[in-house]
Amino acid sequence: MTISIYGDTGSGSFRRVLTAAKHMGIEFEHIPVDLLEGESQAPEFLTINPAGRVPVLVEGDTVISEASAINLYLAEKFDSPLLPKGDARYETIKWMFWAAEHWRVFSSYLFNERIGKRVMGVKEDPTMVEFIFNNIRANAAVLDKHLEDKKFIVGNQVTLADFDIAAPFSQMARTKLPYAEFPNIMAWQQRLLDEVPAWKETKQLLDHRMDSAFSAFGITF
Ligand SMILES: N[C@@H](CCC(=O)N[C@@H](CS)C(=O)NCC(=O)O)C(=O)O
C-alpha cells in the first residue's frame, strides 16, 4: 500500500518525517501542502487532520498526524535502528517527549514572533521574546550538558530523538535562536549534517523553500 506524506518542505515538523523516511530508505509519495497559501486550513485537508497541521501520513485506512507519532510508526514498521531496542528505546522516546514539551515549543513561539508577525506587518513583542529566550537558554543548558560526552542524543547512534530535537535548527538562520552560545549543541548539529545525508538534504530543501517564499513578500534574512 502506498505511503503518502502530506507536508510543506518549509516546515520543520515535516522535515523531521521527511528526514526519517529518507534515512530509512522508505518509498513514499510526498503530497505538497502549501502552508503559505493556507492549504493546511482548507476543508479537504481538515478532513485528514482536523488540527490543520502538517505532517500527516496516510497509508490505506491508517491516518497519523504529529511528526513523532509518524516517525515511531515508520521506524517500527521498517524495524529501523532509529528506534533502538531495549533501554535505548525508552531513552529515545524520553527525549522525544522532552523535545515536544520543553524544547520545540519555544522555537515555534519565536517563529511566530519573528517571522509570522513580520509577514503580517506586526512588530515582535519584546516581553514575549525575552520569555522565549529565557526558556530556550535554560533548556539548551540541559541539552548542552547532556551532549558533553555523546555523539548523538542517545549514545553513538542517530535516533528519532536527534531529528525531534534538531528540528528548531531549521529556522535558526531566520529566527536567530541563541544556540551558538552552546558549543556541544553546535558540534552535535554539525555532526548530524556531516553524518546523516538526509538531514543535510532536507535542510537544503527547507532553506530553498523558505528563502524563495519569503523573498516574494520582500523579506530577506
Ligand atoms: N506538534 C506537531 C506540530 C505540527 C505543526 O505545527 N505544523 C505546522 C508547520 S511546522 C503547520 O502545519 N502549521 C499550519 C497551520 O498552523 O495552519 C508535530 O510535531 O507534527
Image: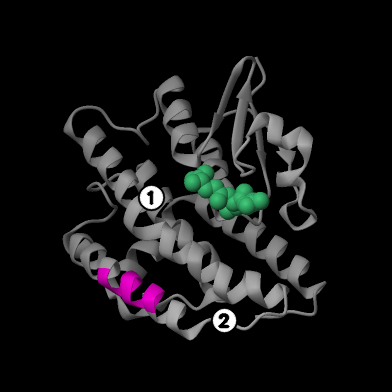
Residue drawn at point x = 49 percent, y = 66 percent: 109
For label 2, the SS is loop
Q: Inspect the magenta stretch and tell me whether residue 136 lies in it.
A: yes
Q: Say whether disc 2 or disc 1 marks the residue closer to the N-terminus.
A: 1
What's the mark number on residue 100? 1
Q: CA distance from mark 2 to mark 1?
A: 24 Å
Q: Give the amino acid at mark 2.
A: Glu
What's the mark number on residue 218? none
Q: Nearer the viewer, mark 2 or mark 1?
A: 2
Pick the front one: 46 or 156? 46
| Residue 135 falls in image quadrant | bottom left
Does residue 115 sit above or below 126 in this rendering? Answer: above
**Where residue 147 sits: x, y (%)?**
23, 61
Residue drawn at point x = 76 percent, y = 66 percent: 213
Query: Is 111 displayed left or right of 3 in the figure?
Result: left
Q: Residues within 10 Å of mark 2 (few under 14, many from 20)?
A: some
Does residue 170 sit above or below 44 in this rendering? Answer: below
Query: Which residue was labeled with disc 2?
Result: 124
| Residue 142 falls in image quadrant | bottom left
| Image quarter of the C terminus | bottom right
Does residue 129 sit above or below 195 in this rendering? Answer: below
Q: Does mark 1's beta carbon lie closer than 8 Å to ligand 1?
A: yes
Q: Over which residues does the magenta segment extend?
A: 131-138
Q: Main secondary structure of the magenta part?
A: helix
Q: Decide if residue 30 is in sight here.
A: no
Residue drawn at point x = 63 percent, y = 25 percent: 58
Does residue 64 sit above or below 19 in this rendering? Answer: above
**Where residue 197 sits: x, y (%)?**
51, 50
Pick the front one: 174 or 125? 125
For label 1, the SS is helix
